[in-house]
Image (cartoon, helix red, strand yellow):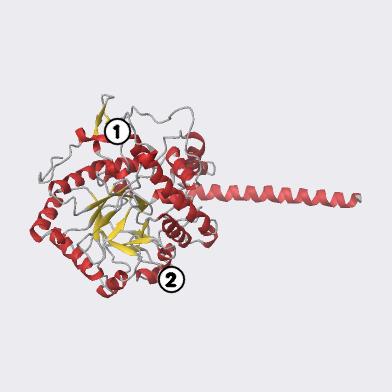
Amino acid sequence: MPSGFVVDALLFLAALFIFTVGLGAMAVVILYIIDRTQTSHAIRRNYPVIGRMRYVMEHMGIFLRQYFFAMDREEMPFNRSQRTYVYQAAKNEDTTSAFGSTRDIHTVGSVLFVNCPFPTLESDAAETSAETIGAGMCRHPYTTSSLFNVSAMSYGAISKPAVKALSAGCGMAGAWLNTGEGGLSPYHEGGGADIVFQLGTAKYGARTPDGALSEEKLRELGAHEQIKMIELKLSQGAKPGKGGILPGGKVTEEIARIRGIPVGEDSISPNRHPDIDNADQLLDLINRMRDITGKPVGFKCVVGAYGWFDDLFEAIHRRGLQSAPDFITIDSCEGGTGAAPMSLMDYVGLPIQESLPMVVDMVNGYQLRDRIKIIASGKLINPADVAWALCMGADYVVSARGFMFALGCIQAMQCNKNTCPTGIATHDKRLQRGLDVEDKSQRVANYIRNMHKEVGIIAHSCGVPEPRRLKRMHARIVMQNGRSLPLNEIYPDVLPGATRPNH
């Protein structure tokens, strides 16, 4: 190699180094001037340039805690142990673990299931029994044995490949898929899943141009064979008392067409249905929708004040059982996917642990248990969560974030920014590329099947042949004195006719 070439290369590298150092020094000077003259951040004003590291480390701390510092059961909203179960179940991997539980069973509120001395033999185990929603009350009642289903997630809040994977996975596993309040898209139908169409406060997918309910569009929806039920959303756990929020960056032309809203503008729903002021008007709308579609109709809410349930159930008895909602979905207050004010997520509404038994008891007390099915929602993503809800009286359990984990969610907390790194909650085509529909749909199906299997294992340990036979006596709760009490002592079963249960 000629020596002149080496000298030239060294001179070029030296010049490049000096240029890079000079560019870096210039950048530092510019940042110094910017930081000293700006008035928004005291740290940067007092400690120019190096003060910026505080904000970098604050952002990086989210990820450092998740992967390096937080213990398996410490993180919020879902800890590593909870997520790991979903990942393993979705991949059909072994969910057993070695050397004992890492769960602190002495923590107040811990659930302990009561195994019996003579558990159900495999040969005596039964398939999960089917339940019919709307039996004898509508033209097309819905019968399903699926205990665990997909809760409301709109196309718009989540991406096209995510919806397609959920639809196909539910179709394979025989579960239902809730559209969320964003309307019915072709991707909900494409996988062959049973569909629950959710009607939110903005009436997306079934609205007139001024936001009222369109009977014509609702009748068209009722004609869809895959749509099995209609869910009227009163409130949700992420933002009780506030309507849905879809940032304008996610409102593409297609989503705008499906919802009936302008392209690129924030989609903000009213904080309640303008045409529902009281229990009677709620029943009026439920019956109107059931008459139009012929499908079972119920409502979803987060429980806060609960005296209005007395008004509702008394109105049902006054008007007749046919006027009742076919189901009630009880959502927890801990928040959910998408964008929501922290003041609502953190402080408004009751958790599912309190609201579910309350509503079940009131339905029992008003002798409506055979008429109204109860669906539980809210951070119920592991088999013990689902088994607890069944013990409490739920007929079905639905989950949104559990299925996001099954799709590959890493809890990056980017759902509201269109920057979801796994392609689930973004409309960025580059990021969506990472979500393979065929692979993820199989994971969704695996998650549902393994959930049914392991809830069944808990039921068999408690001595019942199938999960729907679980009762409050089959679980206990750890109290403040360190001892546990049976659920049926903490929440005594309410006999039919004992209205206004004491809570």
> Which residue carries the number 2 mark?
253
> In x, y percent, where is residue 362?
16, 46
Q: Residue furthest right?
A: 2
Q: Visible in this render: residue 213?
A: yes
Q: Residues within 10 Å of mark 1 (few under 14, many from 20)?
A: some
The quarter in which the C terminus is drawn is top left
Residue flagged by tag 2: what amino acid is it?
Glu
Residue at 47% over, 41% down: 84
Q: Taking 16 as reference, is 159 left or right?
A: left
Residue at 38% over, 46% down: 452
Q: Taking 124 as reference, is 438 left or right?
A: right
Q: Residue furthest left?
A: 318
Would you place residue 64 above or below residue 342 in this image? above
Residue 420 vs residue 104, the one in the foreground? 104
> In x, y percent, where is residue 323?
15, 61
Q: Taking 22 as reference, is 503 left or right?
A: left
Foreground mark, 2 or 1, reads 1
Element on which disc 2 rests: helix
> Which residue carries the number 1 mark?
109
Chain-order first, disc 2 or disc 1: 1
